[in-house]
Amino acid sequence: MARNRCPNCKKRVPRKAERCPRCGTEVESRPPKWYERTSVTLCVAAVLAGIGFGFIHVIVSVEGPFGLPFDLAPRQHFGYREMVVDAGKIGALPYVAARLKYPLGCEVLRRLEYLPSSPTFETRMVYELREAMDRWYAEFEVATGRAPCPWQDRLQEPPQASETDPQGAAACNRRAVTYARQGKYADALSELATATRKDPVCAEAYYNRALVYLALGNLGQAASDLGQVVQIRPDSVEAYVERGLIHVTSERYDEAVADFSQAVEIEPTCAEAYLRRSMVRYAKGEQNAALQDVKKLRSLGVPVPSGFLHALQGGPLLDESTKDPPFRSRRRR
């Protein structure tokens, strides 16, 4: 209750009292001020509004069904995470990055049909991102004059002088390379298994077996063998780059960035690792970090794919105008 002050003893007295209970001096009553009348009401309204926002999503950057510059959606559970969903910000990100960074926002946008909810759409968006990354790297190879290298040409053979034992690890590794280039993958894996058993620190055998597993689509075994390579040879740039590409395929983007970062730490002029890391950071929605890698490529005198630069500036992944946009400007009625 608001109080007045006694003009004599300066003590506070109840607002409705006519005299001071201490000295008996007559006190002139005053009307309560506006904030005294409404403080409790405002506090209750603020608490109710705060609780209410825990049960709704506020969708901005869209046109609601009644022509309003926002839309509302009930929440499936109480909480304040992603209370305000910015459809424009989510739509400007690559789909994979948006799904990882704003999972509730993507869910509510799909529920309101601002974002298609079909699993086919999700698969298509992930496929389009991978297709775009492959296209950008192919453009990079053309611009830098690099001819596409078949995986068989990346197989590592031991020097001839190391073949003193025809049944040794080096000889098994060489026979495995021959089998792999002939398409006899089972024989190649058998020889490589023998090589690693006879020489557990034969990095070439582990690396070659990883490439054969990649050709067969066994990403898990390939990543395991590449892990053995980097343990035996911590300075193997090729192993870090290959393992980073496996992580990209498996959508383990943090691990991919770590491997590409390790590669450029070992070889600061490794343009492929810079470009791969930049594309992964773009897929994660980290545009600023991706641009830093682009600047590094330019400082090395390496051309950057124009399609990738266009995507970093907010352009679409694909150029076809017939593709359906991933986000709608307004909800279906």
Image: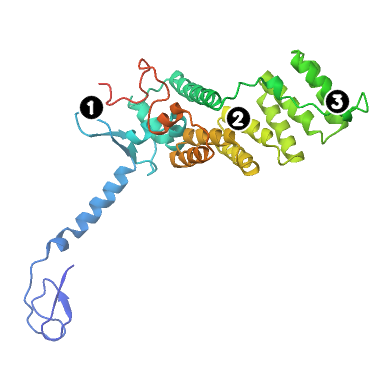
The amino acid type of the residue labelled 1 equals: Pro
The structure residue drawn at horizontal position 34% and vertical position 43%, both measured from the top left corner, is: 54
Q: Nearer the viewer, mark 1 or mark 3?
A: 3
The amino acid type of the residue labelled 3 equals: Thr
* Marks 1 and 3 in Cβ contact (< 8 Å): no
Q: Position of residue 108 (x, y in %)?
A: 36, 31
3D distance between C-alphas at marks 2 and 1? 44 Å
Q: Residue furthest right?
A: 165
Judge by depth and name the residue closer to the eye, 208 or 250: 208
Q: Position of residue 46 (x, y in %)?
A: 25, 51
Local packing at callout 3 (Cα closer than 10 Å; few below 14, some 14-19, many 20+) is some
3D distance between C-alphas at marks 1 and 3? 67 Å
Is residue 124 depicted above or below 303 in this figure? above
Is residue 114 depicted above or below 260 in this figure? above
Q: Which mark is residue 194?
A: 3
Q: Give the quadrant of the N terminus.
A: bottom left
Q: Is residue 286 left or right of residue 240?
A: left
The amino acid type of the residue labelled 2 equals: Leu
* Marks 2 and 3 in Cβ contact (< 8 Å): no
Local packing at callout 2 (Cα closer than 10 Å; few below 14, some 14-19, many 20+) is many
Q: Nearer the viewer, mark 2 or mark 1?
A: 2
Q: Which residue is mark 1?
A: 65
Earlier in the chain: of badge 2 and badge 1, it is 1
